[in-house]
């Protein structure tokens, strides 16, 4: 029996499941697969509506849940209420994940849902992922991709086999990951980062972007294959003009381009 069949067998043992659903490749594929195994009526997609979530990701999540016909619930969440998170330590993601899973498990218990799935994959266990530690603190929360050894590439392949166009969608991360550790996070910074990234996407037509917030300085990371889209003088001037309106005095570009975990190294 291959691991896809073993994963399906694992899913089938649950009467009902709530999926921690961000709208990214991992959670979208997990949601679709779980709905295929259990049926749409036994699955609920639960998305955090939070200052740390990019607005474009919330819209992607809404569209996909609607497309496949799964009930979609938005839970209001504000990680900034937690002093530990707001201070932005290197284990910031632990506090975020713990708050998120606490809210989803509370929701699941009230709704009589038997388990919660979240989308950490096997590759992520090898990186800086303090958030995954929070998963082990909850009895009925499972990480099926990690449990059965699915890598990101394998999940993208499976999404493609299932016919979903998001299979090659760029990796996602919460907006707080754009702020260097040790610099306090607040809602104003998060809104500015969200607006800045949306502007870069609209102007340069890139799919993947991070705007790292260093106070007065914005450092743009585009997808490595998309960097040339920012090399036009006209495009660069428009981006600088718009980001200065948001309060950045200096707008810089990281010539290396986007690479996961880069800010953790600084």
Image (spheres, rainbow, N blue to C red):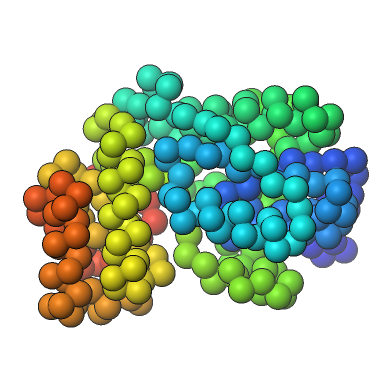
| Quarter of the view holding residue 251 | bottom left
In the rendered picture of this protein, how many numbered marks are placed on residues? 0
Estimate the x, y position of residue 203 in percent, counting from the top left.
28, 70
Position of residue 62 relative to residue 164, above or below, is above
Any part of residue 3 in sight: no
Residue 121 image point, x, y percent: 60, 52
Residue drawn at 53 percent across, 55 percent down: 59
In which quadrant is the C terminus drawn?
top left
The percent position of residue 50, horizontal first and vertical second, equals: 48, 37
Question: Which percent across, then down, holds residue 142?
Answer: 71, 39
Can see residue 208? yes
Q: Is residue 184 above or below residue 36?
A: above
Q: Residue at horizontal 69%, vertical 58%?
A: 66
* Image quarter hosting the N terminus: bottom right
Point 77% across, 26% down: residue = 109
Tell me if 232 is positioned left or right of 32 in this view.
left
Q: Residue furthest left?
A: 249
Residue, far top? 83
Q: Residue at x 34, y 68 (%)?
A: 202
In depth, the one of 127 and 102 nearer the eye is 102
125 displayed left or right of 263: right
Tell me if residue 105 comes above or below residue 14 in the rendering: above
Front position in the image: 60 or 109: 60
């Amino acid at each position: 029996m291959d691991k896809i069949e073993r994963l399906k067998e694992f899913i089938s043992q649950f009467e009902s499941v709530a999926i921690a659903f961000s709208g990214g490749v991992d959670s979208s594929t997990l949601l679709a697969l779980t709905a295929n195994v259990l049926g749409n009526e036994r699955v609920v997609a639960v998305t955090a509506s939070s200052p740390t979530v990019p607005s474009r990701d919330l819209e992607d999540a809404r569209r996909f849940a609607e497309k496949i016909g799964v009930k979609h619930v938005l839970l209001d969440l504000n990680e900034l209420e937690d002093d530990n998170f707001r201070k932005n330590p290197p284990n910031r993601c632990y506090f975020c994940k713990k708050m998120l899973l606490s809210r989803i498990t509370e929701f699941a218990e009230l709704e009589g849902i038997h388990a919660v799935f979240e989308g950490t994959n096997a590759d992520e266990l090898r990186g800086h992922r303090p958030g995954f530690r929070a998963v082990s603190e909850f009895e009925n929360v499972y990480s099926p991709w990690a449990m059965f050894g699915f890598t990101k590439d394998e999940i993208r392949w499976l999404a493609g086999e299932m016919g979903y166009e998001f299979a090659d969608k760029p990796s996602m991360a919460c907006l707080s990951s754009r702020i260097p550790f040790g610099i306090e996070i607040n809602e104003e910074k998060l809104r500015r980062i969200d607006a800045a990234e949306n502007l870069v996407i609209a102007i340069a037509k890139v799919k993947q972007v991070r705007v790292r917030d260093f106070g007065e300085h914005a450092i743009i990371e585009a997808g490595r294959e998309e960097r040339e889209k920012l090399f036009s003088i006209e495009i660069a001037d428009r981006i600088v003009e718009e980001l200065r309106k948001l309060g950045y005095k200096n707008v810089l570009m990281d010539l290396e381009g986007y690479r996961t975990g880069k800010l953790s190294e600084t």
